[in-house]
Image (cartoon, coloured by chain):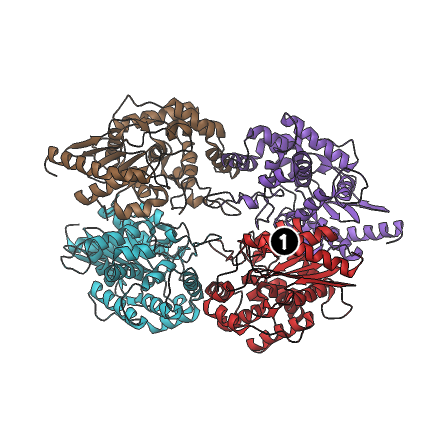
Chain colours: A brown, B purple, C red, D cyan
Amino acid sequence: MNNLSDFNCELAFITDECRKYIKYGKAADYIPVLAKADVNKLGVYIISKDNEYFYGDYDDLFTIQSIIKPLILLLALQDAGVERVRSLVGVEATGKPFDTFNYTDLALKSEHINPMINAGAIALCTLIKGSTFQEKTNRLLDFTRKLAKNDSIEIDTTVYLSEKATGNKNRALAYMLNAYKMINEDVEELLDCYFGACSIKVNCKDLANIAFALAHCLPNEIINEDDARFVNAILSTCGMYDGSGEFALNVGVPAKSGVGGGIMAVVPFRMGIGVFSPALDEKGNSVAGKKILETISKKMQLSIF
Amino acid sequence: MNNLSDFNCELAFITDECRKYIKYGKAADYIPVLAKADVNKLGVYIISKDNEYFYGDYDDLFTIQSIIKPLILLLALQDAGVERVRSLVGVEATGKPFDTFNYTDLALKSEHINPMINAGAIALCTLIKGSTFQEKTNRLLDFTRKLAKNDSIEIDTTVYLSEKATGNKNRALAYMLNAYKMINEDVEELLDCYFGACSIKVNCKDLANIAFALAHCLPNEIINEDDARFVNAILSTCGMYDGSGEFALNVGVPAKSGVGGGIMAVVPFRMGIGVFSPALDEKGNSVAGKKILETISKKMQLSIF
Amino acid sequence: MNNLSDFNCELAFITDECRKYIKYGKAADYIPVLAKADVNKLGVYIISKDNEYFYGDYDDLFTIQSIIKPLILLLALQDAGVERVRSLVGVEATGKPFDTFNYTDLALKSEHINPMINAGAIALCTLIKGSTFQEKTNRLLDFTRKLAKNDSIEIDTTVYLSEKATGNKNRALAYMLNAYKMINEDVEELLDCYFGACSIKVNCKDLANIAFALAHCLPNEIINEDDARFVNAILSTCGMYDGSGEFALNVGVPAKSGVGGGIMAVVPFRMGIGVFSPALDEKGNSVAGKKILETISKKMQLSIF
Amino acid sequence: MNNLSDFNCELAFITDECRKYIKYGKAADYIPVLAKADVNKLGVYIISKDNEYFYGDYDDLFTIQSIIKPLILLLALQDAGVERVRSLVGVEATGKPFDTFNYTDLALKSEHINPMINAGAIALCTLIKGSTFQEKTNRLLDFTRKLAKNDSIEIDTTVYLSEKATGNKNRALAYMLNAYKMINEDVEELLDCYFGACSIKVNCKDLANIAFALAHCLPNEIINEDDARFVNAILSTCGMYDGSGEFALNVGVPAKSGVGGGIMAVVPFRMGIGVFSPALDEKGNSVAGKKILETISKKMQLSIF
């Protein structure tokens, strides 16, 4: 990978080869507006220490969805410290879907309410500073802009309102957290913050920049090293929902997917990658997106294992 | 048992003997107002075809709580018919606590969302006639009055407001039902109806009268025979929460308990019984209440098995 | 139903009407020999205090399978007493299939290891007297003959050997009971006893006689009243596997089904009924068998609710 | 870490500092012979590309227990290829203890029968070449010797016989796998192989050598790179039982623990580490062992995240 134009060429080839996997997935349909996504979109953006590579619909905007979870975790770590984060949420894998209640007959399995499942991410929103939930949402938006180096990032109001109107499973999760005294906040306001943050619009380059920051590649103070390790470790075990084991085998780097079709992959000390393809497998991960990352990882020897 | 005063004497003796079991239970504490109940209260009322027997605090008022569930089921059967009831809720035991989500990793176990667990009872409220939820609540209140032959029955507003303020596990259950499209109604209004109905104040005599009606003992048209069989059958398998098997062995009649301390027991074709004692076991059943019913059942040979 | 021949006529009509439900079920196939059952067989036998009614293949032999469970429970009650039975097994419904492990992440749910699921029945075999497991099996066989008033009842060796060869889920259940110290016996010998007992061959009349004994209808000392109540109570909540709630609604009497196609129904103080039809629903209950019992129950007003 | 004697000094200091954590654990007691372990033993061995460091009881022998699981997986990959391995076992975390059945009401969750839980490791033994299970065991023993560069490694017969005599939960797991047709082999012979392999005696140096081989540090053909990546990836998500998330955060390298008190840690491209301390936490991981690894990781910057 010594020549910029050479690898861009190869990246184009890889991406086009992976296009055939689109047909094995379908767009998320739990809210109507997501179901309208154009499943033929396919893009990738790579930022390494020396170069940037990109191809396809890398410029298209989509909602960040669950990829906001590592940012919620990061900001909660910055705002409240690791002790408060750890006392609120667990860090073990659930072996279950992302919207799991993770509930035995008698109690929440709090050790497994981790920051990468909905319940854990919603709980962490309470640790983000701000006297109102609007303020918390704005801080998450600003934080996203800063990590992505892109001040034009905005919230997609249509998606936000759609999530708010139909997100009753998240509502149920939040009331459950409240019933078990994990959180004390007003549930509707808290959900507004979460729904708003999930509706932030990004593109592949934005995700690549965020991942680059998580990869310990920036000399600046934006993310401290311990916080990044915390996030990368939990992305490695839980970032791809209940398909994290498979992803570790096939790709071998910390990553986070969202039902908007994005995947953000962190290659520690080397690079950040963003891919976009809205056709999802049954676990909620972009099918062609995973395949592009797998191919790049083998080609560039990215696996950390 | 051919002499009224004789059996009243024996009932007094039985009840006083069972008083010692109070110490093995404690008042419900999931809402503050219930925790204030006087656990030393103990009362019983029996209505047979020929006589009435009673002793102790049979006149004290307490909230009906889950004992409203068979009445919700009955009214739903009357208002919507057995097909609609059966298509909405299941009839199998859960093997789990009353507030169970009964949820696998991927779906609600709808067959086990039965009318005697909270989720099933909340769902059934949607089948009760009324253009507003206030109307539905009023119909449940009127129905309770009619079955109990007591027009002075009212809702305890303090308990109602307390349930509404703190009932977030029920809120979570209701949003879950909505997320899985079991119900389409406005969740907060639906819960208002359920919380209101659970807060109806009754005494032992009221419960005995309702049970007497369920026991096929009335010549009137209040409860049709098939509906009563439906209710009694499901009380027998699920009426005492996750202690229904034990109760079937020890007492052997359909019954329903509530966390207010009441138990309503139906002896088909023979009698209706109401007991009251607010000290509950860990499953939510009145400890001394169960013991009184067990002793009466053995003495009077009430078991239907 | 005042005339013997009249009701026999009606019973024939009912049975033939229910024949059409055969097509909704299929023979058990977990062991090869059961899969060979002739699904067109259909028989019924009723023993009341005054009369006997029968129709169809009431004389055909089939293996008793899970219908041996109430007899294991009865004999364990006689041999070891109610305290030892209760300390070994629970009595609550599981809300799960008959071969459930009923296992949380950390422990067996012992309260729900009831005598009507495989794990509970296997455990109870340890309480039956006999210095060897062969002796225990023989005592179960003799007990069955005595209750059925039929000395010619035998074990089907082919079925027994087939169960023994392929019954690895029961083997897993038994080793689990041992690992959790619920039982200490040699697992293979214990399973021999259980597999042997399940392979006892009976016909509808045998089941009707056993049910008649459980119905408190015999003046003799074969089954004591308390033991019969124990059995009937648990049949009512758990006898038809995870379809017990539905059966209580539709038929309303204690009953036990077996994957051989038999159902034994107890009408307390009135009669015993045996039906046979090997086409099972997905829960393991005879489809046409249930329908015959439902029709008879409505016709004769048998429901205890 | 540029000077051998310097870091050995530091390692001694670290190890002695971590000795205080012993008191928070206790020896495994599920088989009597393990309960006799001397919990005061504490040792560590590090093999890097340039140096070896060691301290304490690094020479003491203990049984390898679950640390054999990555070796079973490796040998199965070599003997049967990745396709057969992947078709037999899953790779997702369970969110449950190591001896989980991972069983829903109706089926095994086969995707979560991974090679690091007992059920998965037992299943993989069927893929190891050998016409008898004795041969399979011998191949695992030889493979362990080769990776550890230590021909004197033997099986501890006392532990093996104790596992065989008391390992009924593993027996239950194996019969369950058989009942669900995941395996067809004779269960007792298969368990002999597994119990034998778990009883292999190793020391810290042996574990360090095995880890060094997994770390892609050997120029030889013992472990191919893809197989090592497979193993390291699954160790990262599932190697420390239900504490793998916590370990990823605190230490950040692929590792496997055993109830004998050992932990083997793989630092890809850099080093292999073995630690030994038999006092375990409630999840079965060595308490002081984890703490030593955490301290070394922070000191040497070993985290791959």
Task: Name the residue tied to disc 1.
Answer: C18
- The amino acid type found where label 1 is placed reads Cys
Q: What residue is shown at x 20% (from left), y 45% (from top)?
A: A298
| Residue A103 in the image, given as x and y percentages of width and height | 48, 45
Q: Which image quarter: residue D272?
A: bottom left
Say if D64 sits above or below B196 in the image.
Answer: below
| Residue situated in front as seen by the camera: C204 or A35 | C204
Q: Is residue B260 visible?
A: yes
Answer with left or right where residue B64 lies relative to residue C162: right
Q: Residue B236 appears at what percent x and percent y?
A: 67, 50
* Secondary-structure class at tag 1: helix
Task: Say which quarter of the image contains residue D190.
Answer: bottom left
Q: Measuring 48% from the left and 64% from the top, which residue is drawn there?
A: C31
Q: Nearer the viewer, residue B213 or D289?
A: B213
> How crowded is the residue under tag 1: few (<14 C-alpha within 10 Å), some, or many (20+)?
some
Q: Chain of mark 1?
A: C
Quarter of the rendering occupied by the C terminus of chain D: top left
Q: Quadrant of residue D187?
A: bottom left
Left or right position of A41 against B202: left
**Residue at far top of view:** A152
Q: Could you tell me residue A43's position as x and y percent?
A: 24, 32
Q: Is residue B285 visible?
A: no
Relative placement, left or right, of B130 versus D296 is right
> Looking at the image, is D251 positioned above or below residue D54?
above
Nearest the camera: D170 or C213? C213
Above/below status of B231 relative to A264 = below
